[in-house]
């Protein structure tokens, strides 16, 4: 029986870069050769979520949401648009962080669909956040003498959103790799605006837990943190702010190791992707001293 | 004919029922008559619309099959493409009018190149120069039909179609992949059948799948009320747009000048929209996310009550305002030359109109907009 991986993401009517990470990770996974087909579907771009399954020839499909948290999109919109009519959020049996997989027959196509949890709440995402710190500092051993900030939106509409931020901040902290670790938010306290108030250490890596670079990660956060008064003039990395050096990493979703998280989600759902995971981890590694 | 093609032909001829495809019939004779026949008994039958031969030895069968368009055609479809009852196969068959023309007519046409238009795409199917019956495909913009390949940016990997079609010729982002602003100046050439379908599906996602369902009479149309009733969150309000306004939505957004799909959705299953759905080659089965997103704005606009304002305009000023709206709506603003003051939407003309008729607050005729409810 042929198997497809379908990565579903938000996309954008306004920002052409929104879908770029999804395409990049699909390409990385496609090159690893673990699936007969690798497809992408979007809420705002095409193919739409409602039609993406019919672009797959495979009989069995692993759907992995390129979303940060469990919530409105992963629990309502995506299953509805994929026409997983038997979907019920209790099938994930999740506490807001622990969704893994639920399997259905798609009403539209008759395919067997393994609906996986979002990339943002998978434990391997913590490795991507740390990898992002390695990428922005160009140091695979970065940690000692550094603070680490995970930045999330903190929307009141989705309590699971903050859970995902806290979850990963805790896991980074437990690594004992960075001197200080803090979860910060755009719309809640502790606020990313006051990033320097939350760290005593001089060097701070800031990694937004966002899928793609857009208004929030390219305009709001740099301006809120004081990296620049106007995002259009750009900013330095690292940038001096209130006696600290801020290493702003941009959206974690743009980190190439994110492809590994997608594969881990599919693996948890039963897909045979062990070799692909090893291949992806190797090809996305930051080489010591490599220049961008 | 390649050796492996003849081997496949022999194998198929000896299977249940033999071969009966696109006019080619090949079978082991006597298979049905005498189940105890030895391997050498009976021989083979080979038939096409032009001639028929029976009692053939294997080498004689080879002589009949060699150079036969019917054999390479059979091999291409039944051993290469396969995928019966699938969108991809149906689309490729469509690209050479396979259900309308016999093999020889098609091979003659393919030798010159058979052209199918698919939205703003021009797809040309040809035969491989190797005489093996394999098809090759060229995909480009219809407006580049007559341009030499050397003049066009050349591509071969279907995945490159994603970046290529992301922006229009002016560099603007294209959120609607089936918008009529597909950029020009490129070609995917010498594609095999697999990459040809992949390229088309990348440039126009899910269009082959939906066209196929329509051909088979199984297209699942979601009408306006189906789709808007399904929306939740910030798009839940779109279901409140009055029916009359949905006519304007369809006329504004789904015209052939805006999207190459043919609108098949109506207001509801029993309530047809008057707006023309267009003549596109493939169907639009439901209001798209762009229409829903714009519909949210239109819904809020339609909540406002009309009110009366008094302005005084010369006939030319009235016509100029109308001309400006037309130029924006039809996407002609950028074509108006700087000194062409005869065009209503010319920048000098428009700035003059603003200087004359609008006050310092940007109010037309100095009449304030009344937002009080």
Image: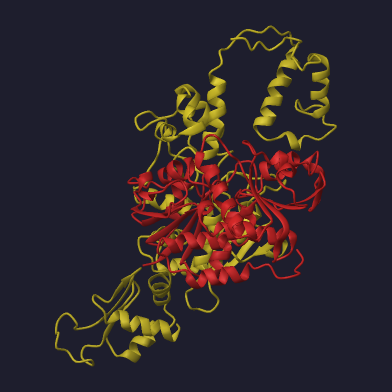
Chain colours: A red, B yellow
Q: In which quarter of the image is residue A187?
A: top right
Residue B61 screen position, x and y as percent: 34, 86
Q: In this view, does B359 lie to the left or right of A85?
A: right
Which residue is more in the foreground, A60 or A45? A60
Where residue A248 appears, x then y in whole percent?
73, 51
Above or below B342: residue B36: below
How many numbered markers are drawn? 0
Q: In which quarter of the image is the C terminus of chain B?
A: top right
**Residue at the spot 73% in from the left edge and 70% down from the top edge:** A288
Q: Can residue A55 be seen in this view?
A: yes
Image-quadrant location for residue A140: bottom right
Q: Which of A129 and B110 is in front in this view?
A: A129
Residue A49, percent from left and from top: 47, 47
* Residue A289 in the image, given as x and y percentages of width and height: 76, 69
Vertical comparison of B57 with B240: above or below: below
Residue at (68% x, 67% y) in the render: A286
Q: Residue at x 19, y 83 (%)?
A: B30
Q: Nearer the viewer, residue B256 or B198?
A: B198
Relative to the observer, which residue lies in front, B19 or B373?
B373
Q: Residue B1 is drawn in which quadrant?
A: bottom left
Image point (74%, 15%), residue name = B363
Residue B53 in view of the camera: no
């Amino acid at each position: 029986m042929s198997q497809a991986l379908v990565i579903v993401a938000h996309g954008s009517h306004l920002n052409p870069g929104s879908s770029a990470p999804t395409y990049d990770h699909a390409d990385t996974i496609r090159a690893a050769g673990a699936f007969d087909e690798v497809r992408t579907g979007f809420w705002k771009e095409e193919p739409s979520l409602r039609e993406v399954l019919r672009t797959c020839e495979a009989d069995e499909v692993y759907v992995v949401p390129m979303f940060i948290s469990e919530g409105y999109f992963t629990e309502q919109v995506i299953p509805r648009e994929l026409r997983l009519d038997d979907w019920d959020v209790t099938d994930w049996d999740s506490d807001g962080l622990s969704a893994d997989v639920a399997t259905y027959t798609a009403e539209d196509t008759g395919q067997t669909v393994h609906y996986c949890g979002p990339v943002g709440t998978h434990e391997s995402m913590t490795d991507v956040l740390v990898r992002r710190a390695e990428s922005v500092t160009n140091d695979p051993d970065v940690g000692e003498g550094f603070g680490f900030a995970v930045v999330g939106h903190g929307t009141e509409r989705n309590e699971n959103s903050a859970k995902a931020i806290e979850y990963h901040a805790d896991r980074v902290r437990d690594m004992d790799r960075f001197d200080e670790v803090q979860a910060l938010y755009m719309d809640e306290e502790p606020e990313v605006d006051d990033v320097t108030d939350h760290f005593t250490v001089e060097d701070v890596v800031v990694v937004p837990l966002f899928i793609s670079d857009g208004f929030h990660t390219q305009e709001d956060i740099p301006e809120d943190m004081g990296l620049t008064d106007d995002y259009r003039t750009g900013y330095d990395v690292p940038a001096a702010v209130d006696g600290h050096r801020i290493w702003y990493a941009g959206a974690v979703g743009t980190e190439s190791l994110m492809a590994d998280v997608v594969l881990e989600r599919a693996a948890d759902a039963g897909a045979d992707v062990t070799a692909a995971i090893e291949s992806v981890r190797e090809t996305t590694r930051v080489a010591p001293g490599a220049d961008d | 004919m390649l050796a492996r093609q003849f081997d496949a032909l022999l194998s198929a001829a000896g299977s249940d029922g033999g071969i009966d495809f696109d006019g080619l019939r090949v079978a082991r004779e006597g298979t049905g008559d005498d189940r105890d026949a030895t391997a050498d008994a009976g021989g083979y039958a080979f038939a096409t619309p032009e001639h028929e031969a029976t009692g053939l030895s294997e080498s004689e069968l080879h002589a009949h099959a060699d150079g036969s368009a019917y054999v390479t055609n059979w091999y291409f479809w039944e051993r290469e493409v396969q995928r019966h009852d699938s969108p991809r196969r149906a689309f490729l068959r469509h690209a050479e009018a396979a259900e309308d023309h016999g093999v020889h007519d098609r091979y003659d046409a393919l030798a010159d190149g058979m052209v199918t238009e698919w939205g703003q795409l021009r797809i040309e199917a040809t035969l491989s120069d190797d005489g093996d019956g394999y098809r090759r495909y060229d995909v480009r913009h219809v407006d580049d039909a007559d341009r030499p390949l050397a003049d066009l940016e050349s591509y071969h990997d279907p995945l490159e179609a994603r970046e290529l079609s992301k922006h229009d010729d002016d560099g603007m982002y294209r959120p609607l992949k089936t918008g009529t602003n597909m950029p020009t100046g490129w070609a995917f050439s010498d594609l095999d059948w697999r990459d040809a379908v992949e390229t088309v599906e990348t440039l126009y996602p899910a269009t082959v799948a939906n066209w196929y369902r329509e051909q088979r009479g199984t297209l699942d149309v979601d009408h306006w009320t189906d789709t808007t009733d399904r929306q939740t969150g910030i798009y839940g309000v779109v279901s409140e747009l009055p029916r009359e306004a949905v006519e304007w939505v369809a006329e504004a957004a789904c015209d052939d000048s805006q999207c190459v799909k043919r609108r098949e959705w109506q207001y509801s299953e029993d309530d047809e929209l008057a707006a023309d759905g267009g003549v596109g080659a493939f169907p639009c089965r439901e209001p798209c996310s762009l229409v829903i997103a714009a519909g949210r704005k239109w819904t809020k606009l339609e909540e406002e009550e009309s009110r009366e304002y008094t302005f005084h305009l010369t006939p030319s000023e009235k016509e100029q305002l109308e001309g400006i709206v037309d130029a924006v709506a039809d996407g002609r603003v950028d074509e108006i030359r700087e000194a062409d003051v005869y065009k209503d939407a010319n920048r000098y003309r428009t700035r003059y109109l603003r200087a004359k008729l609008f006050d310092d607050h940007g109010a037309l005729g100095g009449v304030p907009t009344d937002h009080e409810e």
